[in-house]
Image (cartoon, coloured by chain):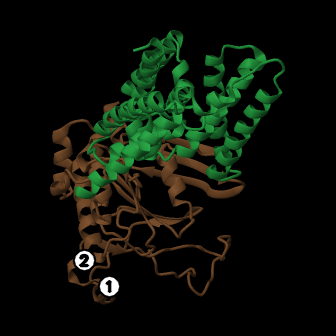
Chain colours: A green, B brown
């Protein structure tokens, strides 16, 4: 097996590992559109990183995070429904990112790999970043797990019982921004939400507790990475879309498992 | 000092005001909740009941006025309803464990509210009445000295209402806790209520409910079996409200100086 294929496999598995539990929260808390908005703003993060000559890892995490905090602020003002706000910010961020990249002088950025991922170009340095971030994300999810479930069930009940809802919510946004930053390399900004929600939705059909669903979602996401990479290897198809199609296939099969129950 | 703790109110609100987008929702609210006392908060829709409850719960801050909880205040809260996404796999037992991790305590609380058989049922599959009992079980799990119940009997028929009221009265005694209960029913309240507060942005009136269980008209409507759990509250306003909620002068024909209400 060649090195680049091994790196691609390890990189994909590392992202799939954390996409499982985070994806569960995206599904439980109905954050799919929110995830899309943050993912789109990561493209703007790349553009700004190149434009200002800052390390891209920092800007693709910082811009979605600022976007998330901005969203919370605007939502509390109550000018517009959250749905409309997300629609405005999501597509504005995508358009702004595309514009800045198009207008950058003397810099050639591979737009396709940003939009749909470039798993086969994962390097050893990328692997360090992916597994470092994955470890931080799993650690944060671990210590906040019960609190996160609690605010997902009912945030007012959680607050009365002593949970610092604002703090836990902000931590979840930080986690989301971190996962988006590492998932970008694998499936690209347009398909990140798919990698988060399809394995989680598949896991729902076979799980009885939140913990089992989170673990099942991780395993399913890892399977889709292997399947997608295999498809990409043998047919020369782009890896990102191949992974998402594999996830959709497994989801369809899980519907059959559910019907038999 | 210990004696002070026992006799001082669990929570005291003094001249609390709250407005949302320039609309006054609460005006100059002062109230005390005492250990072991049951208080029923009634008022029409949009009167600010939920806002007042959220202030007591500490979920929102008043614009002015003070909220002083006693140092040992421990609140058990039963919300009106909760909506949990069907994609979250969570049993009734696990739902309770979010408040108190002890497995035995959860089983005990479910037994207290009479739904032990639902321990493994997904919380989303419970009926309205069952969910209310599960929420009550979670509220008592933390051994509170103040139970806050937001419309606990909403959507429950008269008999169910009766048994829930009896259960709440019993819990209040066994836990020795105060109860703050919200009701949208302006006239029928739990008979064990010590204090009724009628709210319409400000406190319109407050007092004890009349014990009218022998009133033939009451028995005619609710029957003998219900006479212990509910009572009729007679309002004694000294003013009226226009349709938009503004205070207008009292109508002498209805509530004059010789008004017979208590």
- Residue A235 in the image: x percent, y percent? 48, 33
Foreground residue among B198 and A35: A35
Query: Which circle's residue, 1 or 2, is located before the other in the chain?
Result: 1
State which chain disc 2 sits on.
B
Residue B149 seen anywhere in this rendered image of the structure:
yes
Residue A66 seen anywhere in this rendered image of the structure:
no
Q: Looking at the picture, do discs 1 and 2 lie on one chain?
A: yes
The reply to whether dot 1 and dot 2 touch (C-beta < 8 Å) is: yes
Foreground residue among B238 and A236: A236
Residue at point 68% right, 46% down? A77
Q: Which residue lies under the disc numbered 1? A: B218
From this view, report whether residue B174 is shown above or below residue A45.
Answer: below
Q: How many marks?
A: 2
How busy is the neighbourhood of tag 2: few (under 14 within 10 Å), some, or many (20 plus)? some
- The answer to which image quadrant residue A69 occupies is top right
Name the secondary structure under disc 1: helix
State which chain disc 1 sits on.
B
How busy is the neighbourhood of tag 1: few (under 14 within 10 Å), some, or many (20 plus)? some
Q: Which residue lies under the disc numbered 2? A: B227
Give the left or right position of residue B83, taking residue B216 as reference.
right
- Residue A127 in the image: x percent, y percent? 48, 14
Name the secondary structure under disc 2: loop
Q: Quadrant of the C terminus of chain A?
A: bottom left
Residue at point 32% right, 65% down? B128
Give the left or right position of residue B235, taking residue A65 as reference.
left
- The answer to which image quadrant residue A184 occupies is top right
Residue at point 28% right, 42% down? A209
Give the left or right position of residue A80, taking residue B137 as reference.
right
State the CA–CA distance, disc 1 to disc 2: 9 Å
Q: Quadrant of the N terminus of chain A?
A: top left
From this view, report whether residue B199 is shown above or below residue B119.
Answer: below
């Amino acid at each position: 097996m060649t090195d680049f294929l091994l790196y691609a496999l390890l990189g994909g598995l590392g992202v799939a590992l954390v996409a499982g539990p985070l994806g569960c929260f995206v599904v439980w808390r109905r954050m799919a559109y929110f995830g899309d908005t943050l993912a789109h703003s990561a493209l703007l993060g790349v553009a700004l990183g190149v434009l200002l000559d800052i390390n891209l890892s920092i800007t693709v995490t910082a811009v979605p995070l600022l976007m998330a905090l901005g969203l919370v602020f605007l939502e509390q003002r109550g000018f517009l429904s959250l749905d409309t706000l997300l629609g405005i910010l999501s597509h504005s961020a995508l358009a702004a990112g595309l514009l800045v990249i198009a207008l950058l002088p003397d810099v050639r950025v591979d737009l396709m790999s940003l939009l749909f991922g470039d798993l086969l170009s994962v390097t050893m340095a990328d692997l360090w970043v992916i597994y470092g971030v994955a470890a931080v994300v799993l650690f944060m999810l671990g210590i906040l797990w019960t609190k996160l479930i609690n605010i997902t069930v009912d945030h007012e009940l959680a607050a009365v019982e002593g949970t610092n809802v604002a703090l836990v919510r902000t931590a979840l946004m930080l986690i989301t921004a971190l996962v988006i930053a590492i998932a970008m390399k694998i499936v690209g900004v347009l398909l990140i939400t798919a990698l988060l929600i399809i394995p989680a939705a598949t896991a729902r059909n076979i799980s009885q507790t939140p913990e089992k669903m989170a673990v099942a979602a991780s395993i399913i996401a890892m399977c889709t990475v292997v399947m997608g990479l295999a498809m990409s290897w043998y047919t020369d198809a782009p890896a990102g879309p191949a992974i998402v199609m594999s996830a959709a296939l497994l989801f369809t099969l899980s519907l059959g498992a559910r019907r038999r129950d | 000092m210990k004696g002070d703790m026992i006799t001082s109110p669990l929570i005291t609100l003094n001249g609390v005001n709250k407005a949302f987008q320039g609309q006054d929702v609460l005006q100059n609210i002062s109230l005390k909740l005492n250990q072991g006392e049951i208080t029923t908060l009634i008022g029409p829709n949009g009167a600010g009941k939920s806002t007042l409850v959220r202030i007591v719960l500490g979920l929102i801050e008043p614009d002015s006025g003070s909220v002083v909880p006693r140092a040992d205040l421990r609140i058990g809260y039963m919300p009106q309803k909760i909506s949990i996404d069907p994609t979250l796999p969570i049993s009734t037992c696990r739902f309770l464990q979010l408040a108190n991790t002890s497995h035995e305590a959860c089983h005990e609380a479910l037994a207290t509210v009479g739904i032990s058989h639902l321990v493994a049922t997904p919380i989303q599959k419970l009926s309205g009445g069952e969910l209310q009992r599960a929420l009550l079980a979670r509220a008592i799990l933390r051994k509170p000295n103040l139970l806050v119940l937001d419309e606990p009997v909403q959507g429950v028929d008269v008999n169910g209402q009766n048994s829930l009221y009896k259960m709440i009265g019993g819990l209040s005694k066994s836990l020795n806790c105060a109860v703050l209960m919200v009701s949208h029913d302006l006239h029928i309240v739990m008979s064990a209520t010590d204090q009724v507060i009628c709210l319409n942005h400000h406190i319109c009136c407050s007092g004890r409910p009349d014990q009218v269980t022998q009133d033939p008209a009451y028995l005619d409507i609710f029957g003998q079996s219900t006479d212990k759990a509910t009572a009729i509250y007679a309002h004694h306003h000294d003013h009226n409200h226009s349709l938009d909620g503004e205070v207008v002068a009292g109508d002498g024909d209805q509530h004059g100086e010789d008004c017979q209400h208590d």
